[in-house]
Image (spheres, rainbow, N blue to C red):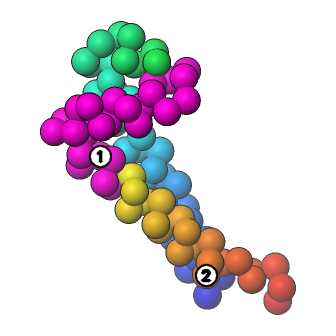
Amino acid sequence: MAYIGMALMAVGVIGSLIFGIMILIKAFQTSILWGLGSLFIPFVILIFVITHWNETSKPFLYAVGSWVLMIIGGVLGGGAGMY
């Protein structure tokens, strides 16, 4: 069960990274200020996603799905060190 949890966490991390980069690319395509703000200032990327929902809804929802996979993987693999 621990291997399944670790695999789900790995898939979740990779997916979250890919979709986060996709949102960041959209921010830079919109404006250099949106891109730099999203990169360096906390929560600006969230504001960008909300204000540009039509463009960023799919990558954001996929990223949320990746976060769910990471949580499930953490729960399944949480007791891995106990055996």
The amino acid sitting under disc 2 is: Leu
Query: Residue 60: x percent and y percent?
Result: 33, 47
The span from disc 1 to disc 2 (Cα, nearest Å) is: 26 Å
Which residue sits at x=32%, y=36%? 49
Q: Quadrant of residue 80?
A: bottom right
The residue lying toward the viewer, choosing from 50 and 66, is 50
Q: Which residues fall within the magenta stretch?
A: 38-62
The image shows residue 47 at horizontal and vertical percentages of: 37, 32
- Whether 51 is among the magenta residues is yes
Q: Which residue is mark 1?
A: 59
Label 2 residue SS: helix
Q: Residues within 10 Å of mark 1 (few under 14, many from 20)?
A: many
Left or right of 42 on screen, residue 50: left
Kind of element beneath mark 1: helix
The answer to whether residue 83 is left or right of residue 14 is right
Circle 2 sits on which residue? 76
